[in-house]
């Protein structure tokens, strides 16, 4: 299971019911997050940000206050949780900045579309995070629901109203 692109229901089933959490700073605009939940996960606290019920952001913080910083092994564990093997992350090298470790992976969502995921941590910070960039669209749950409503419309007036709702949502997702 790749955490990002999964639904809140799928993650609740896998990790137990998530508790409401704060949306990450800049979440609405930068990460397209409308809701966040926290899940205890071994020695980490995992916070997942959702947009229309689909995970688009995940962060991990260590529970241990005596050793809050992330090691290479901690980063490997987090990367494997976000997108498990045999998926392979590409490390993004920046020789000028050795305190930051960045990774990128492209995977397919449940609809077969390629989604890019970026991950980053700073060796001097007590957290690790990954996200789907705002321009990337994970499962468009809202569009699917609106399309079902449009297809089920009984009258011409209902169908036109439903089509307008689909168009408005498409424009909103494109940032227009």
Image: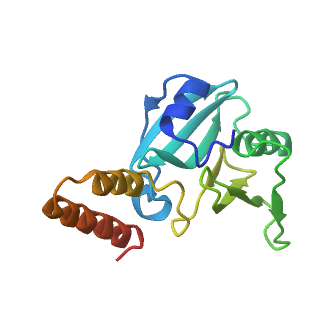
Q: Residue at x 85, y 40 (%)?
A: 73
Q: Is residue 28 left or right of residue 113?
A: left
Q: Position of residue 139 (x, y in %)?
A: 52, 54
- Image spot of residue 171 (x, y percent): 35, 73
- Residue 123, position as x, y percentages in the image: 75, 51
Question: Which sits in the foreground, 84 or 160?
Answer: 160
- Left or right: 118, with 57 as reference point: right
Residue sitting nearer the eye, 77 or 166: 166
Residue 133, picture quadrant: bottom right
Horizontal arrangement in the rendering, residue 119 relative to residue 88 (left or right) = left
Q: Residue at x 82, y 43 (%)?
A: 76
32 above or below 53?
below
Q: How is the image coloured?
A: rainbow
Q: Quadrant of the N terminus?
A: top right
Location of residue 99 with respect to 128 vertically, above or below: below
Where in the figure is residue 124, as x and y percent of width and height?
72, 50
| Outermost residue, bottom side | 176
Q: Is residue 73 left or right of residue 116?
A: right
Which quadrant holds residue 41?
A: top right
């Amino acid at each position: 299971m790749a955490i990002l692109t999964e639904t809140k229901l799928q993650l609740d089933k896998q990790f137990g019911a998530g508790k409401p959490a704060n949306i990450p700073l800049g979440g609405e605009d930068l990460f397209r997050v409308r809701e966040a939940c926290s899940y205890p996960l071994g020695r980490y606290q995992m916070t997942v940000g959702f947009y229309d019920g689909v995970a688009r952001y995940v962060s991990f913080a260590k529970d241990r206050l005596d050793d809050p910083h992330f090691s290479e092994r901690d980063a490997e564990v987090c990367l494997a949780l976000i997108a498990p093997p045999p998926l392979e992350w590409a490390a993004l090298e920046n020789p000028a900045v050795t305190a930051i470790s960045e990774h990128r992976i492209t995977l397919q969502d449940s609809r077969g579309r390629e989604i890019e995921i970026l991950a980053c941590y700073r060796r001097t910070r007590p957290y690790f995070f990954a996200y789907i960039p705002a321009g990337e669209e994970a499962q468009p749950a809202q569009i699917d629901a609106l399309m079902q409503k449009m297809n089920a419309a009984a009258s011409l007036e209902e169908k036109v109203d439903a089509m307008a709702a689909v168009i408005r949502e498409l424009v909103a997702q494109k940032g227009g």
